[in-house]
Amino acid sequence: MEQRVLGRTGRNVSVIGLGTWQLGADWGDVSVEDAKAVLDAAVEAGVTFFDTADVYGDGRSEQVIGEYLRGRPDADVFVATKMGRRASLDPANYTLDNFRAWTDRSRANLGVDTLDLVQLHCPPTPVYSSDEVFDALDTLVAEKRIAAYGVSVETCDEALTAIARPGTASVQIILNPFRLKPLERVLPAAAEAGVGIIARVPLASGLLSGRYTKDTVFAANDHRTFNRHGEAFDQGETFSGVDFATGVEAAAEFAELAPEGATPAQTALRWIVQQPGVTSVIPGARSPEQARANAAAAALAPLPGATLEAVRDLYDRRIRAQVHDRW
């Protein structure tokens, strides 16, 4: 598995990581045993980067990862977590005291003294412009509660504001063939500043796998059921903000671009990995088979120029009008 330096952390991580929202909550039920099997399959396939958050299952995802890694001392895995969404999304809550409490909880969940990377978890927009917030994050580094910090953002403008901060190590942003806007300014700015880019929601909540039809029904406790219109959190987190019916049609067209021997999901991951400035992409997985298939995308040959142009054309024709100006 190819390794790339994750921005200002100075640490190498695999170009394909593992997102672990699925192992915590909001994607239906996953047993602890099944969750550990997914982690194990990813590690065996060369993944060295896990992304989690303190709200995934209210800490369950962190706890499962911590327990798994304690049983695998040979696994050299970089773990990024996130904080800030266990409290109301009020800028006044982003204080040093709360940061200490939140990171102490994550340290206990993961069973570590120092967290590899802590990301502000899609905070309110004013937080990105607060000197006090970033001073508090610097204090966490000085206290060795965390080794580095970054942000997970909803918009390109938020990403650009964070990139301008000298202590920001990484930016996590939605990027996939149905969300191209970060290519315009965010990725170039991050590359120039030496900030890592973590691509999240890489399969548009599974749309780009090509497995769904307009009649597909998801579980009641799956965010693809209860958050299609942003009822619970930002709409962009579900299907990348694309209307489901439109997304299904566009995904069928995208599937036709897959090279021989590759699935549509692997093609989408390969497309992300070869975008200049991307450090790692973090698809989720609910089974060992999915984890292995995702990791295998790193070994695909780069997509040819004609395919890249076809992706842009598909986006411009079917997706752009729905998502580009919103995010």
Image: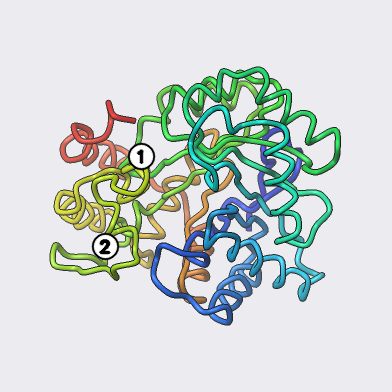
Mark 2, secondary structure of its residue? loop
Label 1 amino acid?
Gly
Q: Quadrant of the C terminus?
A: top left
Locate residue 135, reporting x and y percent: 73, 23
Label 2 amino acid?
Gly
Instruction: Pick whichever, 321 or 258, lies toward us.
Output: 321
The structure residue drawn at horizontal position 36% and vertical position 41%, both measured from the top left corner, is 234
The structure residue drawn at horizontal position 31% and vertical position 43%, both measured from the top left corner, is 235
For the residues labelled 1 and 2, the Cα–Cα distance comes to 22 Å
Locate residue 194, reporting x and y percent: 66, 27
Q: Is residue 188 left or right of residue 29?
A: right
Residue 136, placed above or below residue 83? above
Instruction: Pick whichever, 260 or 76, lies toward us.
Output: 76
Q: How many marks?
A: 2
Residue to which mark 2 is pinned: 210
The structure residue drawn at horizontal position 19% and vertical position 47%, both measured from the top left corner, is 243
Residue 267 visible to the viewer = yes
Q: Which mark is residue 305?
A: 1
Residue 122, placed above or below residue 130? below
